[in-house]
Image (cartoon, rainbow, N blue to C red):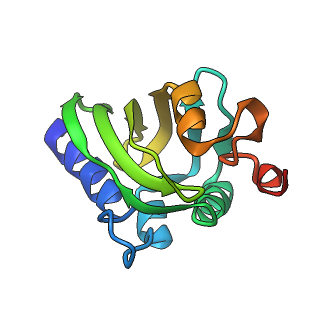
Amino acid sequence: MGIELENKVRTMHDAWGDGSDEVRPDVEKILSFFADDAEWQLWVPGGPVIKGKDALRAEILNQMTFATNNKCNEVNIVSNDRMVMQERSDTAIIMGRPCPHQMVAIYEFNDAGLIVKWREYLDMDDLNRKMGVTGEKNPAGNPEALAQ
């Protein structure tokens, strides 16, 4: 079961893009991997928790307004029958700036093999510096920040 869940995570991440200008996230394909009541914590510690498929859709669409050229790059992955942990070295253009960033993501699955919780552990101070923003001005999870 663990390898099957790992492959679901990989396929979901492929739907975010291939790093090119032409390929944008396939929102509906991404959402197909989530339970209706799924939760996504955008960053740990302290990041907002997005709850439910409608809110996840809204957050992905929000991120698409300031992030392009997404590519999730797996470094390491481990799993069991209910959880996948993945170390990644992702790339994106965020707010017009190259923003490579490293993270560890944890995905918890339900009996149907759908993601119920997704947490991403990353250094937001580092990513904020790369984006050219500070603290509460981070646009992820805060669409009002784009106007600031």
Q: Is residue 32 above or below residue 104?
A: below
x and y percent of residue 62 in the render?
A: 66, 61
| Quarter occupied by residue 80 | top left
**Is residue 50 visible in the rendered structure shown here?**
yes
Residue appearing at x 52%, y 28% in the figure: 126
x and y percent of residue 116 in the render?
A: 49, 41
Q: Is residue 62 above or below residue 139?
A: below
Residue appearing at x 40%, y 57% in the figure: 33
The residue most toward the top is 45
| Quarter occupied by residue 53 | bottom right
**Is residue 42 visible in the rendered structure shown here?**
no
The residue most toward the bottom is 22
Of 120 and 79, nearer the camera is 120
Q: How many marks overall?
A: 0
Q: Is residue 141 above or below residue 136?
A: below
Image quarter hosting the N terminus: top left
Q: Is residue 138 left or right of residue 28?
A: right
Residue appearing at x 35%, y 65% in the figure: 17
x and y percent of residue 110 in the render?
A: 41, 41
x and y percent of residue 114 in the render?
A: 40, 50
Q: Is residue 46 above or below residue 14?
A: above
| Quarter occupied by residue 41 | top right
